[in-house]
Image (tube, helix red, strand yellow):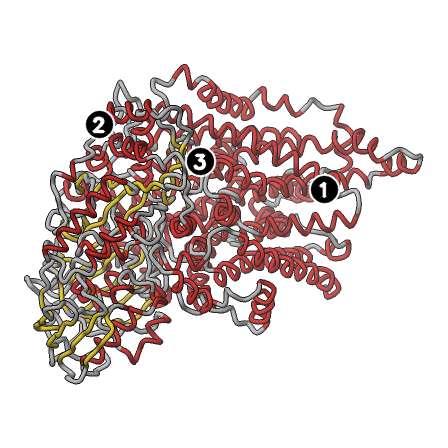
Amino acid sequence: MSESFIDVAAPEVQAPHPDEQFDQRRRPSIWSALRHGKGLVGVILVGAVVALGLLAPLLAPHAPTEQIAGANLVGPSGAHWFGTDEVNRDIFSRTLYGIRTDLIVVFLAVPIGASIGILVGLVSSWWSFTDVIAQRVFDLVLAFPTLILAIALTAFVGPGLRTVFFVIIAVELPVFGRLTRTSVRTVREMPYVEAAHVVGAGSLWQLRRHVLPNSMEPLLVQLAVSMSVAVFIEGAMSFLGLGVRPPEPSLGSLIRDGVRNMYDAPFFAVGPLAVVVVLVLGLLLVSQALAEARRA
Amino acid sequence: MGAYLVRRVPSALVVLVIASFAIFAMVRLVPGDPVATLAGPDATPEARAAIEADLGLDQPLVSQYVTWLGQLAHLDLGTSYRIGGQVSDLVADGAVNTIVLTVAALVLAVAVALVSSVLAVVLDKSWVNAALSFGNTLAIALPTFVTGLVLILLFAVVFPVLPAGGTPPDGFIARPDIAVQYLLLPAVCLALGAGAALTRFLTEALRTEMRQPYVTTARALGISRRRIVLTQALRNALPSTVTVLGIQFGTLLGGAVLVEAIFTWPGLGGLIEDAISGRDYPLVQVLLLLSVAVFVVVQLLTDIVHAWLDPRVRIAGGGTA
Amino acid sequence: MRRDHRSPIVRSLALAVAGALAASVLTACSSAVGEADNGGSSSAPADGGVLKIGSTSDIVPATIFTNSSDSTNTLIGAVYESLVDYPLDSLEPQPRLATSWQLADDGRSLTLQLRDDVTFHSGREFTSKDVEFSIKTWADPVWTVQLQRTAAAVTGFDTSDPHAITLEFAHPLSNVFDLLDMLPIIDSESIGELQEGKAYVGTGPFVFESWTPSSQLVFSRNDDYWGEQPHLDGIEVDIVADPQAQVSQLRSGQLDLVTGASYRDLETLSNDGKFDVTGFEGAAQQIYVGADLANPQLDDVELRKAIAYAVDRERIVDEVFRGNAEAINLPWPDYSPAYDAAANETYAYDPAKAKEIVAGLGDQPVLPLAYPAGNANYESVAQIVQANLEAAGLETELQPTEYSQFIKQLIGGTFGGLWILQHAYAHYTPSTLAVSAYPFNADKNASHFESAEYKKHAEAAWTAKSGTAPEAIESYQALNKDLLDNLFLIELALLHFQVASAPDVQDFTMSKRGELDFRSTYLAD
């Protein structure tokens, strides 16, 4: 499921119809979709999680790796809101700091993967031979299910946040590469761009003037989708033991630890779980709002 | 149609050949080796040398690759280092379980998508849409590992009515009533995301269809919404849905890795994890190649079905979604 | 796709709901859970029934003799028998396939009388030739058995009497009974199939029926068993890799006995009273922190001492192993001839002292601390060790390492820092540990520890006439001193095996080899 909607999202944000492209300036920016309804809820949810993560040092009663003598897997109490884990750490504090790990993944790994993908997509689609090569490479990468890719990559570099980064970049690169390529090709086939080419406008001009602005919206929608997928990938990888290294917390590793203690400490995973669901839900709502605004 | 196939098949083959080379190289570049894993920490150097020779790993890499390709050409997948059996048997056993699970999930997902999207469009009530949209978003936002464990806890531990995991002891055929119970939880868990995605897509496609002029005409002629949806709109929305379905099948196979781990379902996911961690080269190579092949074939089939349902694609040529 | 024109929408919705409900209806007719729970017949001890065991990892045919997994142990224990058996809590060999034995005065030969009423599952009679074949198989390095060196030191076989054998040794072998306890008597005719995982032919109480890789092993009762007939009709081993899934399946009645539950789950199961948790003291493993002396920092024995003082072993025993372990400095269990209660307290938890030593050593760079990834126990122990060392002023970086690479680093001695792992074989004759377990190997070990003294003492212990001879005891004391003074391995805890079972599973035990013994097991109601 983690990757199931990377692809499903694709048909939605697929090649924009040329006739829609022109009136971009006539309608309000899709950003306005985030000021009401679904979009606003999404922004609030994501914003709340981001705030918790950023304020972790102020809000957390303990350091995320501090082992508190005698507090072995105790239940929620005034002293430990979410209880403590199997090596006596405060789960509430770890959850707050764990958010930071996921924020790094969401707001750093995904944009990096996206940028590389966009760059590769732009450059390769300009010539037909690089286009063919890039398409085949994208096919190859996308042919591996994300988690199998993750298992294989971990065999190379060992578990860790770095591996999560690699996997997310590897997964997002072809997604964004494809999307950019589709936009570039659509735009290039438009009569006025062809005309500009005839009168001698350079490739760079075409890129800056037409391709990039017209690709922006589908890319933005995909970015939001990819960000929510990134939370899944982090979680699934940590669940399989391929994620962030102990003692550092991440939401995924906290859920895995909680699941390990499911019978003895059912409270353990509840907090991190809620945060993951809120974060994914928020990002998803944002992406849906953006997509709907684009189509409207 | 024939010409379309001629265009598509070679490029699929090229992907496979490149993949075989990439996989072979990648598998050998991974640190750690099968001999160390097999022999264990206390083995003597001569023991390790004996195992290495036994596995043919003392041969040059190029000759190992050529040998492997030769074997593949004869449909001989080789022998597993670690498990010891024929790779083909191991893969076949695992594949049966994975495919049964994936197909069950796909059927569930399609059923849910058809029922709920048709309901949503036919009823066209705001509360139905809101409920559907909420359920949908939630189904997508709940990670597999969460739903899986909640399902186990609820239906196998607190109310022990369904098995917590594993495959039916008598196989899938002999006792279908028992098999269904073993399948239910993992299939639901796997189907949730795909079902939600399909529902979202199909609802959207149906709504778009319902805005078409012919619908207005039909409505003016007094034909019910339900009738239009079931007879016309659904058929028109089908080609693009099949494409999405194809992609979903591939991703479901991928998602099965995690679901199999949660429900201890002995499928390809566990096999590939074991094979990679044991550096079981013949098994890893075949499994990775297989996952590429499945993707390529599903993509090809999807394109073909799409082309068959939508003649414009056949003529214009063109790629996938 | 459904094109249902007749029924109103509501009814088609009902249809869909009916589909979802189908399962619950089915549950009412015949439940998979109910059928899985096939308890035995009415009264105890009853005959019949199949015992379903959950095991964590599958067998690996190429390393079937290395006790490498719980399912391998179950297979060996069910299908095969050895010449002698050690009781759990002593090193006094008891008869099994051998009825009596005489060790020569010079310790260089051993004559064993064999049972004459034993046949292999293939119907062939068990003779002295089979003993020779089995020992020679173990001496072949391809099988990578722990006692390969010991098996190879058996150089002469007199098999003139089919029901007696005389073994000759290259030198006195203090651990020869360890070999005879661990060595399963295997059938020479089916060795090829054994290698491929297709057949396991022994003389034991259960017959190997089938193996489905990464899924299941099936055994049936050996109706021609020479001993008392087992009560069980058969045994089924299901490979359930996830410890928690094992517990779930035990709770839901799909499994009768699980070998891989976590210590904490075992504690919960035993507390809630619905399941039996059985511990076996005697078959044990030790968890330790290894130090790579190739790292100049760790080459300083003072730092290793600081680590030994810094680690809170009691906390690890209580919190990770839930009290089912003992804090140790030396690997031996209390019945071992090498056991020394006082020496075992040498490095009692003393964080102040550890801190003082580290402070005296000046600035210490960050040390890598590796452990096998994906194992909850190792992960917890590593994090506690890390916190303990940090309190002593020593920074470490945790390196969860995939098992395959971990073993590679262990063999190659390339850790470059500290590592955490378990070892076994300290519950046998002490010389077995010193000459066969890799971390302790005097010739070459992962710690890069070299010492002529240690090597001499290990060799002396091995070539003593018996494991309890005075000269052997003397070399154990020397070995203990070597281990404590050099601390290339810092022992943490001695762990006991535990299994959880449904209450209807009665009368099973475990051998010192860690193999469950189901000869007199039955399923009560």
In the rendered structure, the answer to whether residue C402 lies left or right of residue C216 reads: right
In percent of width and height, residue A277 lies at: 44, 32
Please, what is the three-letter code of the amino acid marked with disc 1? Thr
Q: Earlier in the sequence, mark 3 or mark 1?
A: 1
Q: Chain of mark 3?
A: A
Please, what is the three-letter code of the amino acid marked with disc 2? Asp
In percent of width and height, residue B276 lies at: 46, 54
Mark 2 and mark 3, same subunit?
A: no
Q: Which mark is residue A182?
A: 1
Q: Secondary structure beneath disc 3?
A: loop
Answer with the quarter of the image where residue C134 lies. bottom left
Disc 3 from disc 1: Cα separation: 35 Å
The residue at 61%/55% (across/down) is: B22
Q: Which mark is residue A244?
A: 3
* Quarter in which the C terminus of chain C is drawn: bottom left
Q: Which mark is residue C494?
A: none
Disc 2 from disc 3: Cα separation: 32 Å
In percent of width and height, residue C59 lies at: 32, 62
Q: Chain of mark 2?
A: C
- Would you call the spot at circle 3 few (<14 residues within 10 Å), some (14-19), or many (20 or more)? many
